[in-house]
Amino acid sequence: MPLDTPPRPALVGFKGSVAEPCVLHPEQVVTYPYASSLPARLWRRIDSWEEAQARKAERRGLDDEPPTYHHDLSIPQGCRVGGFPSWHSTDPHPMNCEACAAPMVLLLTLDSCEWSGADGSWMPDEERTIAERLRERCPTQLMIGRDGLLNVFVCPADPGHPHQWSLQ
């Protein structure tokens, strides 16, 4: 039986370290690698496509920003399990297991916000029907670093090996 009031830790460090209780609406989405992790030839093709989209929007006189690979198509914002890590604060670097040298995989991402207020491309379906003034971009009230995210990596060869993490 669920508790009426979940227990809260007595001391964590600061307010943004513990998520506020909120409703969970899991969605399965397809993610793609961070842009600079892609082969150079593919990244050049994506870059050309983005430039073409920007020119089309400009010719049409659209105020909306055209979609971009990084912000709209590859890696969603928000707390999630699996997928690809975002490297928006640092360059991508290999995360290899310290115990066996196996390439590690992303286990979990904790993000300060769930979706971007600028374009809302990763906005949950449940939020689209709520008036804009009532939408909550950061329902968990987490504050990772300076409004960033935490990627937690696990060894696929042995989950008992030490995890690694990256702040972005």
Image (cartoon, rainbow, N blue to C red):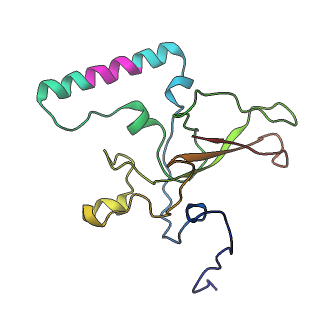
Which residue is at 56% across, 52% downward? 144
Q: Residue 51, image x and y in percent? A: 30, 20
Q: Residue 127, image x and y in percent? A: 34, 61
Say if 6 sits above or below 63 in the image: below
Q: Residue 12, image x and y in percent? A: 67, 66
The quarter of the displayed image where residue 15 is located: bottom right
Which residue is at 39% across, 48% downward? 122
Q: Do we see residue 127 in this rendering? A: yes
Q: Is residue 57 left or right of residue 141?
A: left
Q: Residue 121, image x and y in percent? A: 35, 45
Tally of marks: 0
The stretch drawn in magenta includes residue 3: no
Which segment is the magenta one?
46-53
Q: Main secondary structure of the magenta part?
A: helix
In this view, the residue in front, 26 or 127, is 127
The stretch drawn in magenta includes residue 52: yes
Which residue is at 57% across, 30% downward? 90
Say if 154 sits above or below 24 in the image: above
The quarter of the displayed image where residue 61 is located: top left
Q: Quadrant of the C terminus?
A: top right
Which residue is at 75% across, 32% downward? 103
